[in-house]
Amino acid sequence: MLGASGHGKVIADLAELLGYQVTFFDARWPQVKQNGCWPVEGDEQALVSRRAEFAALVIAIGNNQVRAERQLHLEKEGFPLATLIHPSAVVSRYAKVAPGSVVFANAVINADAQIGKGAIINTGATVDHDCQLGDFVHISPGAHLAGNVVVGAGSWVGIGAAVRQGITIGKDVMIGAGAAVVSDIPDGLCVVGVPARPLAR
């Protein structure tokens, strides 16, 4: 795993539950040598130099842009990507979850939903039928997407937010905690409130 953070701890815990042995690397090494129960064994350069030792890679970085940059770079270095799905998550056999994505405990992904690579479907989040999530999207804990929602690459749906059916959310959008999205959101906006309204670009 690249990224020794609190988010990394949760992914490591899930990975171990699924039978993986976890090794952490972080750009801040050697200042950061421990991440909870797990030692940090070097920086990204050290990870690349030890490529042959590892069966799969997860980028354990919550920031969508940074996660995208690091995952795309390390894919070019030949790292295979793990897709981690918690045993308590409910993922339809008709849904598609792309490599490098993580689906946390009690999340639900329903029929014909498509999740892009490097996405995070966090604890208790729901993605209903026919949703299309781009690469490196983050759906935060307890956020809910109704059916036929489109979320562009790099967007972040905040904790406890709700998105009405049929909504299109652009790329690199940030939706605030607890927001209710009832109309389409163009690229690059930050929206908050009930109903959600633009705060900034």
Image (cartoon, rainbow, N blue to C red):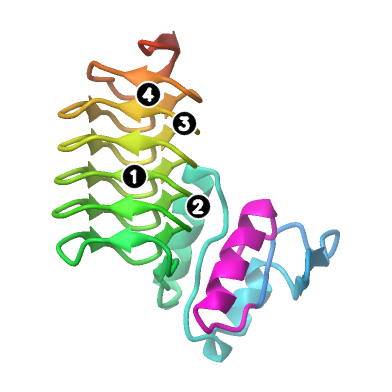
Asked if residue 27 lies left or right of residue 91, the reply is: right
Q: Nearer the viewer, mark 2 or mark 1?
A: 1
Task: Measure the C-alpha gap from mark 2 to mark 3.
Answer: 22 Å
- Give amino acid for label 2: Arg
Q: Residue at x 18, y 29 (%)?
A: 165
What residue range appears in magenta?
1-22
Residue at the disc numbered 4:
188
Residue at the disc numbered 1:
126
Task: Measure the C-alpha gap from mark 3 to mark 4.
Answer: 20 Å
Nearer to us in this view, 1 or 131: 131
Residue at the disc numbered 3:
160
Q: Residue furthest bottom?
A: 52
Task: Measure the C-alpha gap from mark 2 to mark 1.
Answer: 22 Å
**Residue 7, position as x, y percentages in the image:** 62, 53
Where disc 3 sits, the SS reads: loop
Reading the chain from its start, which is encountered first: label 2 or label 3?
2
Asked if residue 51 lies left or right of residue 129, the reply is: right
Q: Nearer the viewer, mark 3 or mark 4?
A: 3
Q: Residue at x 55, y 76 (%)?
A: 17
Residue at the disc numbered 2:
67
| Callout 2 touching callout 4 (CB < 8 Å) | no
- Give amino acid for label 3: Gly
Residue 110 drawn above or below residue 153? below
Task: Measure the C-alpha gap from mark 1 to mark 3.
Answer: 10 Å
- Give amino acid for label 1: Thr
Reading the chain from its start, which is encountered first: label 1 or label 4?
1
> Which quadrant would residue 21 be assigned to in this image?
bottom right
> Which quadrant would residue 93 be assigned to in this image?
bottom left
